[in-house]
Amino acid sequence: MKNLYFIIPVYNVERYIHRCIRSVLEQTYERVGIILVDDGSPDGCPEICDEYARMYKNIHVIHKENGGLSDARNVGLTLALKTAGEDDYISFLDSDDFIRSDYAEKMIAICEGLGCDIAQCGYEKGEDGVFSDTENNPRVYETDSEKALLGYDLKSFACAKIFRCGIFKDIRFPDGVWNEDEFTVYRAVYNAHKTAFTSERLYYYFQHSGSIMDNIAKRLKNNPHRYDWLKAYKERIDFFIRENKPLQVLRTREKICTDIILRYNEQMRLNAKERDTDCVSGKYIEIYRSSYKSMIKRHGIPIKRRIVYALFYVAPYSAVIIGRIFTLRK
């Protein structure tokens, strides 16, 4: 029976940390470990974490100076890999989110049953704090990891997934950047033999006014981190060029185009004074067009996406309308 270790960075989430930890403690799967990484939290979280560790033998707490989400994950990951076997699993859980009680049981059963190194589940997004009705007959399938990276079901975030420990041996999250998952998850998937997907919603992404992603569009204006996502994609392109994977290069260029459309859409919905200067100046469009001409030649792009991409190329403002009727990112 495999172990599953949850890596949970903790910072300033006193209102939510109990719910997060309890959701792991209430798992129907028995062999679950919890690594709480207190990232110099200024509230009552350090004491809360220590109290849980005193009550439960499967909880380990690390206290460290504040270094950000990537640093906290890396510290937890290092401990997990020292503790776990290569065939055990790890999962990243944000401390204001929570999981369904059968998350571990179902995700491990999928990986073990289908012979996969990674499983990704569906997620619920909102602020109600409870899951809606369970899905009847959820879609479950597996694919080789190269096809997973070329497809549209794989999400770039590290959460709502379990990973076999061995594939994270040489991978860490980059410090001091936004969009740290974009630098990391594709490499883990590429290291894997097969990746499994289930549409069943087992992870709850809790949206609230203090979350990292809340109102991120308003934080982009002239922010030095606003192109971290593009830096991640450029690293990804260089990686796949070295690996001689031309289709993966084109798929990454498509992702650049998708992200530009989404960002342009978000910026144009803001008050003019709040918009990122580069959106107004035309730099977004310049970045888009530099990738469009090569990526659009890739076979396998669905026709609706091709239409959206072409429309944005000739009439960028169309994205504001298109974004309301066709979802590029589920």
Image (cartoon, rainbow, N blue to C red):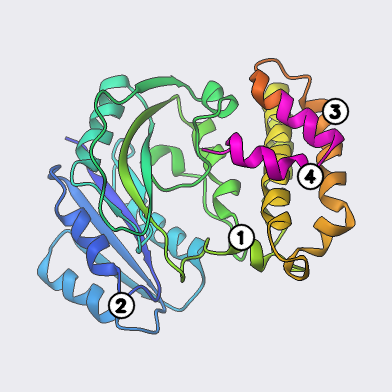
Q: Please give left or right for residue 191 compared with residue 316 in the image.
A: left
Do tag 4 and tag 1 residues touch (Cβ < 8 Å)? no
Residue position marked by numbered label 4 in the rendering: 317
Identify residue type, mark 2: Cys
> In the rendering, which numbered label is found on residue 93?
none
In the rendered picture of this protein, how many numbered marks are placed on residues? 4
For residue 311: magenta? Answer: yes
Q: Is residue 180 above or below residue 189?
A: below
Task: Identify the secondary structure beneath mark 3.
Answer: helix
Please state the horizontal and vertical placement of residue 264, each as a whole percent of the image. Answer: 73, 50
Q: Of the two numbered discs 1 and 2 on the same chain, state the one appearing first in sequence.
A: 2
Separation of marks 2 and 3 at Cα, in angstroms: 50 Å
Identify residue type, mark 4: Tyr
* Residue sitting at x 38%, y 30%: 117
Do tag 1 and tag 3 residues touch (Cβ < 8 Å)? no
Separation of marks 1 and 2 at Cα, in angstroms: 24 Å
* Residue sitting at x 34%, y 56%: 7
* Residue sitting at x 69%, y 22%: 247
> In the rendering, which numbered label is found on residue 293?
3
Task: Name the mark nearer the viewer: 1 or 3.
Answer: 3
Residue position marked by numbered label 1 in the rendering: 178
Task: Identify the secondary structure beneath mark 2.
Answer: helix
Task: Name the mark nearer the viewer: 2 or 4.
Answer: 4
* Residue sitting at x 46%, y 59%: 74
Range drawn in magenta: 307-330
Q: Please give left or right for residue 286 compared with residue 147 in the image.
A: right
Q: Of the two numbered discs 1 and 3 on the same chain, state the one appearing first in sequence.
A: 1
Task: Identify the secondary structure beneath mark 4.
Answer: loop
Q: Please give left or right for residue 233 compared with residue 27 in the image.
A: right
